[in-house]
Amino acid sequence: MNTLLIKATLARGDFSLAVDLALPNDGITALYGASGSGKSSLLRAIAGLDRHGSTTIRVGETVWQDGDHFVPTHKRNVGYVFQEDNLFPHLNVLRNLRFATKRAGTADYLFDYVVSQLALKPLLKRSPVYLSGGEKQKVAIARSLLQHPSLLLLDEPLSAVDEEFKRGFLPQLKTLLAELSIPALYVTHSSAELGQLADALVYFRQGQSPLATTANALFTDLQAPLALRSDAEAFLDVTVTAHDEAWGLYHLACGSYTLNVGGPTLLKGQQVRLRILAQDVSIALSPPMQSSILNILPVTVLELADHGEHQTTVRLQLDTQVLLARITRKSAVSLGLKAGDSVYAQIKGVAVLH
């Protein structure tokens, strides 16, 4: 059974959090929620850095903690990347990486592969002192990957780096983790990071037990606060089916429907995730005869929620996936929208997350 099982009560001062989770022990599981909600505390318990009573932690069939049984951190084969890089300042990048391979007995071909995939060769002779924040974190993550851990724990590793660096690095990280078959828990406050990386999601709520879910289920839940934010969003998983070179557009299959999207180079058959803001989706009762909007798709109204004085958020079914539309309350009334209605979603903006 390839599952990460965690049952614990995490206690620190006047903070206490009950955890009962069965998570997939493959792919990337994002831990998402407000500061102080227990995300880092959970990582530390999994790593064995903090010991709590009445705790069970099992990775597959391997028990790391249960009752009096406690496997110390150095025997758990976990990689841990903090917000700070924690590189050895007296060693250059090459020797920092070789420190990991020596301890883990990593084969040379794996070292060469990770260095190549993360474009680290130009940095190998540099001291960490002369690296940018993003470069330091990239090296720190590479060092953990070279240990080939059974589980990689990442505690907001990119919180201090710029968005441009993230956009380039996150697809590299996701690909490497998949190719090396290393499962990861990734703590983040960023919905963009979550959307780009997460195969599964744990949502940490202040004062409540964390909830295992998916990114789109959480962000499109009209009973949850995320769907009512001004920047409410939804994520769609789609497949590249064709490239229209004449117009610079990719055809993306979302179930039985097709979206037309421009953007970065994509490959036929590639699976990508789209981020669509609720404010970029409008609703029509019938398809417009002439419009500059390329993506006008039939959807079903699932639910409506009024918020603020004049706004309505509409939850929409698109094939097997879910969109949000943010419209004025007047529009919702004028259109007579109600659950079960067949309407058309006009999608004005789409961001492609690799």
Image (spheres, helix red, strand yellow):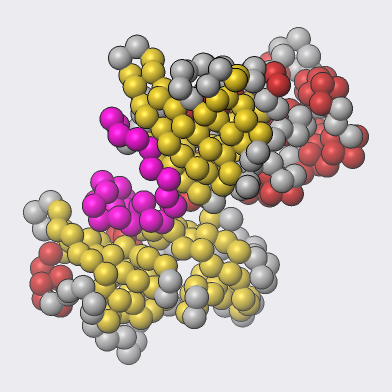
Q: Is residue 248 visible?
A: no
For this rendering, which residue is in front, 86 or 63? 63
Q: Can you name the residue that lies furthest to the bottom here? A: 289
For this rendering, which residue is in front, 227 or 65? 65
For this rendering, which residue is in front, 111 or 50? 50
**As displayed, is residue 204 above or below residue 89?**
below
At x 11%, y 58%, the residue is 310
Residue 172 rendering spot, x and y as whole percentages: 67, 46
At x 51%, y 16%, the residue is 51
At x 76%, y 29%, the residue is 147
- In the image, residue 231 lies in the stretch drawn in magenta: yes
Query: What residue span does the magenta drawing correspond to?
Result: 206-232
**As displayed, is residue 287 above or below residue 248?**
below
**As displayed, is residue 89 above or below residue 225?**
above
The image quadrant that residue 183 belongs to is top right
Q: Is residue 334 toward the left or the right of residue 7 in the image? A: left
